[in-house]
Amino acid sequence: MNGLMKQMNTLTKILKWGLLSFSGLSFATIAETMPVISHEDDPASQTVNDAVTNTSKLDEKKEDSSSWYSEFKVVPFGFLSDTIGNSIGAAGLVKGAGQPQAALLGAAFISDKGSFMTYLGGYNYQLSERWLVNFDAYSAQFKDYEYYLGPNTRNDSKFEDSIITDGQESRLQTAFRYVLPIGLGSEKGGSAGYMSTREVTSWNPLESGVSSLSVKPFFKSRHLDNNVYDEPESTWGVELKADWDNRDNLRNTTTGSRTQLSLTHAPDTGNENPWTTWEFQNSHYFDLGPLADIFNKQVVAFDFYTAGTPSWDSGTDGNEHRPPEYAGVRLGGLFRQRAFSGGRFTGRAAINYSLEYRVMPDWQPLQNWPIFDLYKVPWWQWVVFTDVGRVADEYKLSTLNQDMQVSVGGAIRFQVEGVVVRTEMAWGDEESVFRVMVNQPF
């Protein structure tokens, strides 16, 4: 409870500071969670995909059609954090950057502890009729930051077994996405890949949804001062992904599904050891309809995730072909096992089940509240959720489905100018975690 009150007091101080708009809040929370480098979708790119087609009342518009951009916005922000320190920064979003649907996002902050972060990304660039490309670069330094390493990331590890040290982290990646000529892609081509609303016409990928293949080369690094755990400080590789997105709405899904399968390989060249991982994720959404005059909408959302490391036992004793923990199979953070810090659990394999009950109340007062009235807030959503899962050093279903970690929680989510902001509280057997972030978890 003390942890919850500390987080609530921190959030209150941030809001009273006055530098923080809801757009700034999105970037601030992205910045605070960026130390967790993972295979999960980049929240910054998801934010841009949603925001690029929406216009804030604070946007600066370019009327000159010959300009290389259509809209530009800079948002200063500040946040308080026990781990990062008291921070100030700014984020800038350029819409229509070179192409009408494309955007550039930049963000940076610095804290009184000496921590800092810089981020730059470009999104929704269409190279041809069916090819899209996203790219981003991230660099950060964190002073006196809390990390879990080695055996202390296993499923049976203890909460108090973290270390406090300085860390320097970076990431470079570019994703080339090909929209297949089936389903919505046969009609819309590459533009289907960034449409926020779609009609679910069937459960056949040949007829409905957006099917795509992507290739994403990446480079990741993490250097920890006084690190007693030996692991490579950098790695590079390529991720291949197949994605069938059959959701009716990317921001507030009521029906449909999404299935993703990815294979990531780091070759021997340029790495201390080669390694390979795979991930599978399947999400389903069920519309329960309204409930009298209480809820306009009820949705049950279910997500299944599993991952493995087929190269785990390859190589020689003490020189196995395993990824660094910051690039391997992980649970904890913004999307899976939300009651734990990002990357709290790592291992050879993982499994996770998430279930959410989402409702949209008939009562919606936010549009008339101070600060909220500066933006378009068409809906808000109440959510209860649970995550059940674990990591293991073998991929065996009987092992992965016993002694599992459990997160339970509640959330309030709302759309602000096309961006879904989620505030949520999660409880686990180690701690309770309060977060403010952008986008639905799945």
Image: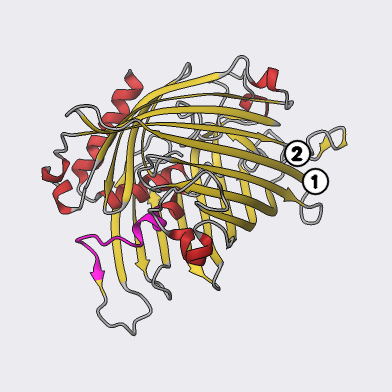
Mark 1, other Cα within 10 Å: few <14 / some 14–19 / many ≥20: some
Is tag 2's residue or tag 1's residue first in the polypeptide sequence? 1
Is residue 43 at least partly visible in the picture? yes
In-image side of 319 versus 407 (left or right): right
| CA distance separating discs 2 and 1 | 7 Å
Lateral position of residue 277 relative to residue 2, left or right:
right
Residue at image location 43% in from the left, 76% down from the top? 98
Location of residue 364 with respect to 116 vertically, above or below: above
Residue 264 vs residue 248, the one in the foreground: 248
Position of residue 373 in the picture relative to residue 1 (left or right)? left
Residue that carries the numbered disc 2 in the rendered image: 322
SS for dot 1: loop
Q: Position of residue 365 (x, y in %)?
A: 13, 38
Labels 2 and 1 touching (C-beta < 8 A): yes
- In the figure, is residue 191 to the left or right of 64? right
The N terminus - image quarter: top left
440, above or below 345, in the image = below
Q: Tell me the residue at 77%/56% (across/down).
A: 270
Badge number at residue 273 = 1
